[in-house]
Amino acid sequence: MPKKPGSSLLGKIAAIDVTADPSFQGADQDKKPALLPKDIFALLSKTVIGQEQAKKSLAVIIYQQLKRYALRSENKNLAKTNALLVGPTGCGKTIMARTLADIVGLPFLQIDATSLVQRGYRGGTHIDQFVDLLFSAAKGDRKRAEYAVVFIDEIDKLAYNPHDESELATFGVQQDLLSLIDGSEVFYEPDSAEYSRQSFSFCNVLFLFGGAFTGLSHKKELAVSDLYSFGLMPEFANRLGNIICLDCLSEEIIRQLTHQTVRQYAAYVSMTNAEENAYAEIIFSLLLADKSYEQMGGRCVAPLVRDFFEDLIFSYENKKGGE
C-alpha cells in the first residue's frame, strides 16, 4: 500500500484535530496553528510533483482556514477563503485537494458537479444530499463534518446559456450552492425515518472547486469576469474565491511522476535501484511514444505502470508460492 502522504513528517508534526486541539480554543490569540504554510507546502510536495505556485496558494489558504478555527472563540470572524483550481485533465487538481485535507486531518468529500445536475433539480434537495455526504465523509461525526474540505470537480460543467431552457438545471444547481459556499446555517432532513429537520452549519466548511474551463485554461491568469463570460452566474462566480491556474504537465514532470509511481511497487516486487530506474524509464518511453499524457496528463501514468507490473508481480508471487 502507498504510504499516507507526508507520513514521516506527520510523525513529528501532529495532524490538527479541530475539535480537540486546545490551540483551536482561542485561549492564546497569538498562538499559531501547528502547521505553517511552509510545512503544508513541504507535505504537499511529497505527493504532488510540480505545480509549485498552486501548492503555495493552497498552503496559504488552508493555513488561513486553520487560523480562523484558532480564533473562533475570540469573536473574530475572519472571512473564509475558498479556491477555484483551473487546469486540464490530469494536472493534479484532485490529488492536491485530497492531500491537503489529509495533511491537516480533516474529512474530505469529493463531488462531481455533473452528478448534481444528473440527479435533477428539485429545489433545495442538494442541501440534504450535501449534508448526508458530509456525515458519511466524517464517519458520522457531526462536529468533524462541519470542518470538512469539499472538492467539487468539473464546476465548469455548470455553465449555462440563459437563452437555453434545457440548461435551467445547471442554473438551479448554482443557486442551490450559493448558501452553502457562503457558510450559512441550513436546515436539512436527516436520512432516517424520523423526518425531523435539523440545522447544519457550513461556516467552517472549506470549498475547493476544480474545472478545465476549456478555452480559458490557456491563460496564465483568470479574472472573475472570465467566469461570467464562460457561463457562470455572477453571484456564483464571485464566491468561488481565489482563482488558481495550474500548468499542463511537462515531459519532465511526467518522468518524475512515473518514477514516483514505480517506486510504490517496491512493496510488491523486490527491485534494486538500478532496476527501478530502468523500469521507470521504459514506461516513460512508452508514454512518450503514445502521447497519451497530452490528453490525460498524469492520469495516464498509473494504469500503464500497473499493466507493466501485472505479469511481473504474478510471476514473482507464483515463484514465492512454489518455494
Image: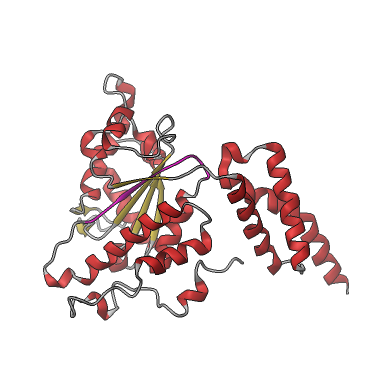
User: Where is the N terminus found, in terms of image quarters?
Assistant: bottom right
Front residue (pair 188, 309): 309
Q: Position of residue 108 (x, y in %)?
A: 40, 59
In this rendering, position of residue 5 left or right of residue 321 = left
Front residue (pair 18, 42): 42
Could one spot residue 257 in this view of the protein?
A: yes
In this rendering, position of residue 68 left or right of residue 107 = left
The prevailing secondary structure element of the residues shown in magenta is: loop
Q: Position of residue 11 (x, y in %)?
A: 47, 79
Colour mode?
secondary structure
Front residue (pair 186, 294): 294
Q: Position of residue 233 (x, y in %)?
A: 25, 33
Q: Quadrant of residue 312?
A: bottom right
The residue depicted at 77 percent of the width and 68 percent of the height is 272
In this rendering, position of residue 41 left or right of residue 76 = right
Could one spot residue 139 in this view of the protein?
A: no
Front residue (pair 178, 132): 178
**Farthest top residue in view:** 163
Q: How many marks?
A: 0
Is 145 contained in the magenta span? no
Give the answer, above or below, for where 1 lies relative to 131: below
Residue bounds of the magenta highlight:
80-90
Give the answer, above or below, for where 145 lies relative to 23: above
Q: Position of residue 273 (x, y in %)?
A: 74, 67
The residue depicted at 17 percent of the width and 76 percent of the height is 29
User: Where is the C terminus found, in terms of image quarters?
Assistant: bottom right
The residue depicted at 42 percent of the width and 56 percent of the height is 55
The residue depicted at 36 percent of the width and 72 percent of the height is 35
**Farthest right residue in view:** 323
